[in-house]
Amino acid sequence: MGNANTPIPKQPLNKDDVIKKWHESRICMTEEYDTGAVVFQVDGIPIGTFGNFSASIGKAKSKKTFNVSAMAAAALSGEKVLMYEVSLPEDKKKILYVDTEQSKAHCKKTLARILALANLPEGTDNDRLEFLSLRKYTPKERIEIIECALATTEGIGLVIIDGVRDLLFDINAPLEATQITSILMRWTDEYQIHIHTILHQNKGDENARGHIGTEINNKAETVIQVEKDKTDENISKVSAVLTRAQTFPTFAFRINDHILPELVEDYVSEPKKAGRPPKKEFDPYFDIKQEHHETALERIFPTATDELNYEELQDRLVEEFRSILGSFNKNKAAAEITFLRNKRMVVQDNGKLYRYNKGGYRY
């Protein structure tokens, strides 16, 4: 995928190809469009459909993999596992499970867990479940392997990617994050499947990690959070963070003596504390609109030859965003400069002075 801060070279347009895509993209009132069959449900509430992707987020050791093992088992068995019900049509009964983090020995344990939860023999492979361990490959190779599996395997309806972060070289590169979410959306649309991904949360807050986390939050059909119960660390609770429809009730599971997740019956989540929720950390990618970034830069750099050092740029950003947003400080300006550099909206030609790279970036 290359360096995320390297501009994408302009390729000559194939006019016929662009016209075809343009016509295919038209929406007409006289046409009927498939909304996508429901794949996942929790307590009867749809959380995943064909043609879309969803995600699980959680901190380390929150039991995210145990949670998606239950999803895979529900798809394999056709029965409810934990609170998950998965319906796959006859021509899309296969499941592709991709692990990017664990060794083959640990992946085999996850595979055995899925088969056990589905009440299937552990010592025999199931032809409806293909399990891939991609730990040893590069992000580019992992994407190519998944693409090849989708293109050459008939009947796949559900894909689980345990470790979507490992499809990127740099988790904080905006361009790579956009590329990966675009690939996920293309796969779901082109192959008419549902993809469920897993991503870690930041240690210090509840946000999904990196720019890929922001992109997934923006594009996913449903985002599920898996976290340890604050009163009992042996229990993991599962709740809906972002949905396009009705929110499903929070439920919880524990790991039993057979090292399998089992539902905690009649679980009652800890009530929310009174008062205001904790303030979300400032994120220029999420908290400032594209046009506001560009407006500020147009004012700060009125000509193509204008250059500023770091402190001058920081002070001017504070001044401009206070006029645009009403309040802004130097800490936010520092985060904004990092964002602008990652997006290549500002560049340093001589190593020190910044200039506006107008027309040389993609948002």
Image (tube, rainbow, N blue to C red):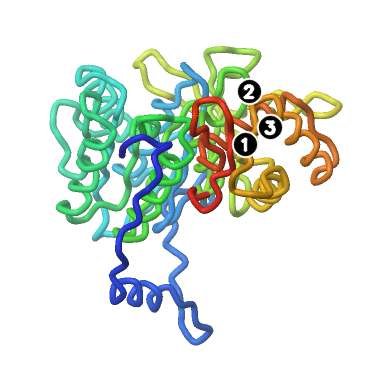
Kindly identify the residue that appears in the image at 43 percent across and 70 percent down: 34
Question: On the image, which quarter does residue 3 sit in?
Answer: top left
Q: Nearer the viewer, residue 212 or 55?
A: 212
Most extreme residue toward the front is: 305
Q: Earlier in the sequence, mark 3 or mark 1?
A: 1
Front residue of this view, candidates 208 and 305: 305
Mark 3 and mark 2: span between their CA atoms? Answer: 29 Å
Q: Look at the picture and state if 40 lies above or below 314.
A: below
**Residue 264 visible to the viewer:** no
Amino acid type, residue under disc 3 in the picture: Leu
Q: Which residue is mark 1?
A: 307
Classify residue 350 as left or right of residue 157. Answer: right
The reply to whether the C-beta atoms of the residues labelled 3 and 1 are less than 8 Å apart is no
Q: Is residue 122 left or right of residue 85?
A: left
Q: Residue at x 53, y 46 (%)?
A: 222
Q: Regarding mark 2 in the picture, which secondary structure is present there? A: loop
Checking the image for residue 313, the label placed there is 3
Q: Quadrant of the N terminus?
A: top left
Give how far across and how far down residue 291 sits, in percent.
66, 53
Question: What amino acid is labelled 1 in the image?
Answer: Glu
Frontmost residue, 17 versus 131:
17
Question: Between residues 65 and 338, which one lies in front from this camera angle?
Answer: 338
Question: Circle 1 — which element?
Answer: loop
Few, some or many C-alpha atoms within 10 Å of disc 2 (few <14, some 14-19, many ≥20)?
few
The label nearer to you, 3 versus 2, is: 3
- The residue that appears at 15% across and 53% down in the rendered structure is 152
